[in-house]
Image: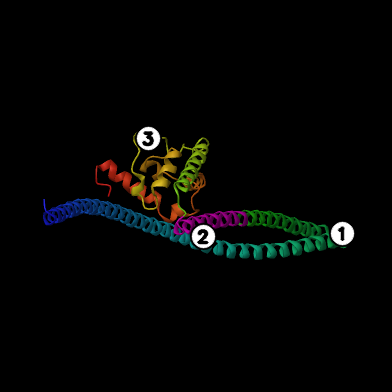
Amino acid sequence: MTFAEAVFWSIFWLVIAAILGGLIVWFMLRNRVKYLQGELKSLQKTSDNYRGNAEQKQKELDLEIRARDRKLEIAQTDFNALQAQLNEKDRALQIEVGERIDLQNKFNNYKDEAEAFRANAAASGNSQLEIDKLKAILEDKEETIKMESQRRDELAANYAKLKTDCEQAQTKLKADIKAKEEELALLKAGIGTPKADTAEGDKKEQALARVREKAKSFDYSRIGLASVEDKDDLKIIVGIGPFIEEKLHALDIYTFEQISKFTEDDVEQVTEAIEFFPGRIQRDHWITQAAELWEKKKQGLPLT
């Protein structure tokens, strides 16, 4: 083999080796590109999933915030209504205080007159007829003093009771509103966690347990007894939500008929037992609504 042939074949095999090396590198790069493209698609899909979950969570959070805002608005409305009641009761208390002062003054005047009559009767040299007349007037004044004294004591007792009721109702409502505001603030700050949900569930169960305990002393003589088999959908009544319905069930109140038979004493007992806003049952007209729904049910008419 000549030198030229040797050079030719060397170059030939070098070219072949370069081509094969290039093909190998090309195949390796192509496979790597395909692998990276697959990884990119996977990452893109994961990113889309995360974005979708984030958007869904944001929508759920927005809905929950709006629901909490609505609850807070309702609580504020109830607070304003109760504040108006408190102002009205305060005016009534001021009137009663004025009446009490007037009665005290009358009491003192009658007492002074009685003492004067006694002194005149003792010191006077009048006839027996005039003395008897003075005694009759004195007895009448003493009876009036006794009645005014009883009235004064009744006003004092009513004043103390009204003042205590107002203070307790205002304190409870302020605490409820503060708790809702704190809960809403935590939710908006993104601190609402499953642990918080668990704590809220515990509070709910504790509230139902308190209602069940009060059911033991509840007077069912007027509204009658019912069981879960007899239950109506109490949420149809405006003013009764899911949680209030659960509380009523815990109090063994299941039917429209029972609510339609509420008296003022029953309303007071129920309000206290389910820890409801004072006066809310009357304002939402539970009794009237329940009576209408019970009548429709008896006649087989649609309830809604």
Question: As drawn, is 22 to the left or to the right of 277?
Answer: left
Q: Secondary structure at mark 2?
A: helix
Question: As drawn, is 3 to the left or to the right of 289?
Answer: left
Name the dominant secondary structure of the magenta segment. helix
Please say if 217 is above or below 303. Answer: above
The amino acid type, in three-letter code, at marker 2 is Leu
Magenta span has 231? Answer: no
- Specify start and end residues of the magenta stretch as a single range: 163-190
In the picture of the structure, the residue carrying the numbered disc 2 is: 82
The amino acid type, in three-letter code, at marker 1 is Ala
Residue at 46% of width from left, 59% of height from top? Answer: 189
Dot 1 or dot 3: first in sequence order is 1
| Mark-to-mark CA distance, 2 and 1 | 58 Å
Q: Position of residue 22 (x, y in %)?
A: 19, 54
Residue at 37% of width from left, 59% of height from top? Answer: 62
Q: Nearer the viewer, residue 203 or 250?
A: 203
Residue 138 location, quadrant: bottom right
Local packing at callout 2 (Cα closer than 10 Å; few below 14, some 14-19, many 20+) is many
Dot 3 or dot 2: first in sequence order is 2
Q: Secondary structure at mark 3?
A: helix
Magenta span has 176? Answer: yes
| Mark-to-mark CA distance, 3 and 2 | 34 Å
Local packing at callout 3 (Cα closer than 10 Å; few below 14, some 14-19, many 20+) is few
Q: Secondary structure at mark 1?
A: helix
Residue at 42% of width from left, 40% of height from top? Answer: 249
Q: Are marks 2 and 1 in contact (CB under 8 Å)?
A: no
In the picture of the structure, the residue carrying the numbered disc 1 is: 122
Q: Position of residue 169 (x, y in %)?
A: 56, 55
In the picture of the structure, the residue carrying the numbered disc 3 is: 228
Q: Position of residue 245 (x, y in %)?
A: 40, 44
Q: Position of residue 200 (x, y in %)?
A: 47, 46
